[in-house]
Image (tube, grey):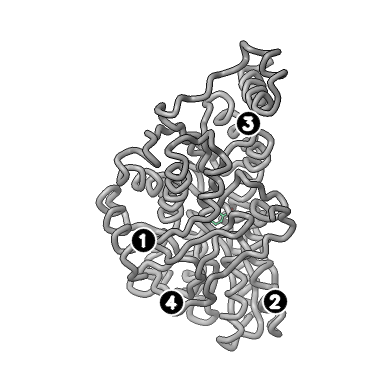
Amino acid sequence: MTKNDKFKLTRRTLLTSAAGVATFAAAPRLFTPAIAQGAPLKVGMMLPYSGTYAKLGTFIDNGFKLYVEQKGGKLGGRAIEFVQVDDESKPEAATDNMNRIVGREKADVVVGTVHSGVAMAMVKVARDTNTLMIIPNAGANDATGAACAPNIFRTSFSNWQTCYPAGKVLFDAGVKNVATVTWRYTAGAEMIGAFTENFTKLGGKVVADLTVPFPEVEFQALIAQIASQKPDAVFSFFAGGGAVKFVKDYAAAGLNKTIPLYGAGFLTDGTIPAQGEAANGIKTTLHYADNLDNPANVAFLKAFKAKTNNDGDIYAVQGYDAAALLDIGLTAVKGDDKARDAMIKAMGDAKIDSPRGPLSFNKAHNPIQNIYLREVRNGRNEMISIAQAAVDDPARGCKIS
Ligand code: PHB
């Protein structure tokens, strides 16, 4: 038995014992006493701190910690301590990493992650061990769909949610033929799928569906295909380092002058400083825009800049809101996370005045939120309009009622 297995066993025994005294009595030495209410709550941050999504993970981490600092290091009166695991956006290591954070590190709550494939492996462990989990980015539809669970929340988006409204945006702009381009993994497939669902329903046509494996950034072959196909527009999903490279390559080939580039907002969020001029004019849909002038956003951007010397972005907002959601849950139970049902109820009912605008949750614990149409102007993602207000993911396959 490895050290990890032993901790998994300890945890499971603990959970079983909550349901049946017999199990508890039979294995007294495996029982770890519940953390006294006054002891710090251990938050496990499982995020990419390296690789193509490193900046995204770091901004989520900073956003979460900014909120905790603003609350004097406590949420719901309970001191917070952190443990951190770099998941490197590697799905093949995700189950072991999550078992480590839940088992050996004994995190009370896990906050993670960015990559959809890694998140789905985490969801499975969270369900098996009944660990409270808050997803601060990954959009995998199933996390709040077929695999939904009372103990799993998301403060970001579903992949469907960010891109479905874009189908109408492009169609209304007079675009008839589109080439789509993305990485070949869950997030890319689901975002392009949602865009295509709406765009083709309205009468648009997808003339090329181009992909490269994640996290490859060799885009020349795709760009040559787009140039020869000459669609009315391109719709894309890339993020982090890959988005920087794609936008620069697209402009270097001169395509930004002839074929408008659209995408999920991740294409230009947190990436404009590295993309420079190449990003100008790109239109995207997302649940955030830099110039939202609601007081929550203005205060957030100021505080984030003061803490990190960086401009905030959607990833920082999602991390910040993950802490706000945990705060609401812990406040409802006066810091006692073992009062799990009451905590989950308060989190499910939460209405957050987020920097992104009003944020609430559906029965599957996915955000209900505005999706904005933005354009890169003056080095920022500026809001043009609300593409679709209060968008609610259909939560296909979710059995929570
Ligand atoms: C995802 O894998 O779900 C994902 C990753 C990065 C993003 C958005 C979604 O910016």
Q: Work out whether mark 1 precedes mark 3 in sequence or the reverse, and give the earlier one.
A: 3
Q: Is residue 277 above or below residue 30?
A: below
Q: Is residue 349 above or below residue 85?
A: below
Please say if the residues under marks 4 and 2 sit with CB atoms less than 8 Å apart.
no
Q: Nearer the viewer, residue 351 or 286?
A: 351
Which residue matches tag 3? 96
- Residue position marked by numbered label 1 in the rendering: 273
The mark nearer the N terminus, 1 or 4, is 1
Mark 4 or 3: the one toward you: 3
Q: List the single residue furthest toward the left.
A: 306
Between 55 and 102, the one lying in front of the other is 102
* Residue at the image point whose x is 72% and y is 80% from the top: 201
Q: Nearer the viewer, mark 1 or mark 3?
A: 3
Residue pointed to by mark 2? 206
State which tag comes first along the sequence, 4 or 3. 3
What kind of element bears circle 2? strand
The answer to whether any part of residue 158 appears in the image is yes
Write down the quadrant of residue 76 in the picture. top left
Separation of marks 1 and 3 at Cα, in angstroms: 35 Å
**Amino acid on which disc 4 is placed:** Gly
* Real-space Cα separation, disc 3 to disc 2, in angstroms: 39 Å
The location of residue 185, given as percent across then percent down, is 66, 54
User: Local crowd at mark 4 within 10 Å, few (<14), some, or many (≥20)?
Assistant: some
Residue 308 versus residue 334: which sits nearer the camera?
Answer: 334
Earlier sequence position, callout 4 versus callout 2: 2
User: For the N terminus, which image quadrant?
Assistant: top right
Residue receiving disc 4? 281
Name the residue: 39% across, 73% down. Answer: 382
Give neighbour class at mark 1: few <14, some 14-19, many 20+ (Cα, 10 Å): some
